[in-house]
Amino acid sequence: MDPSGRIETLADRRFGDIAVVTFMIVQALDGVLTYMGVHLWGPSVEANPLISRAVSLAGAGPGLAAAKLLAVGLGMVLHLRRVHGVVALLTAFYLAVGAMNLMHLIDPHMIVFAGGM
């Protein structure tokens, strides 16, 4: 049963599994690309104040690893609570922001994203 008391179907489970695995992959890719960006352009490249603070306190590797592990852990909590739509929306959000930042790297005049590089 999901939190609303509705019986979860096989399709619901499959959607949830795909959403959470995709979320984990996107988090890992975001961590790697952020790590590369921090090393290439410095810590000021990170627009998220929580990630920026973690990097300034623990260093790029440990700070990003801790932040991404926390994000994956919270994503797993949502998955286990069967709130798969939220996990899917968070994944889509990370993909959209990542794509905008990548386009900004390719051509800084293409997209202006608040706090971006």
Image (cartoon, rainbow, N blue to C red):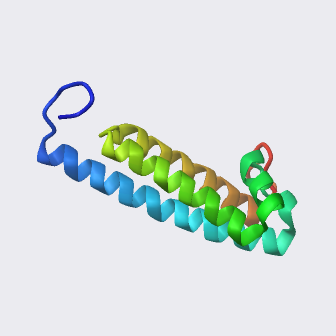
Q: How many marks?
A: 0
**Residue most toward the front?**
58
Q: Position of residue 56 (x, y in %)?
A: 83, 59
Q: Point out the residue furthest to the top here.
A: 4
Q: Is residue 64 left or right of residue 107?
A: left
Say if 108 sits above or below 60 in the image: above
The residue at 40%/51% (across/down) is 76
Quadrant where the image shows the C terminus: bottom right
Residue 36 at x, y percent in the picture: 72, 73
Give the quarter of the figure containing the N terminus.
top left
Residue placed most toward the observer, 19 or 67: 67
Residue drawn where x is 47% and y is 53% of the image: 73
Give left or right: position of 100 versus 91: right
* Res 42 quadrant in image: bottom right
Q: Looking at this view, is 16 or 108 the one in front?
A: 16
Whether residue 23 sits left or right of residue 54 in the image: it is: left
Residue 22 in view here: yes
- Tell me what residue is drawn at x 16 percent, y 38 percent: 8
User: Which residue appears at 54% of the width and 45% of the height?
Assistant: 93
At which x and y percent is residue 44?
Answer: 87, 58
**91 on left or right of 50:** left
Return the x and y of residue 57 as percentages of the image width and height. Answer: 81, 59
The foreground one among 75 and 105 is: 75
Q: Is residue 95 visible?
A: no
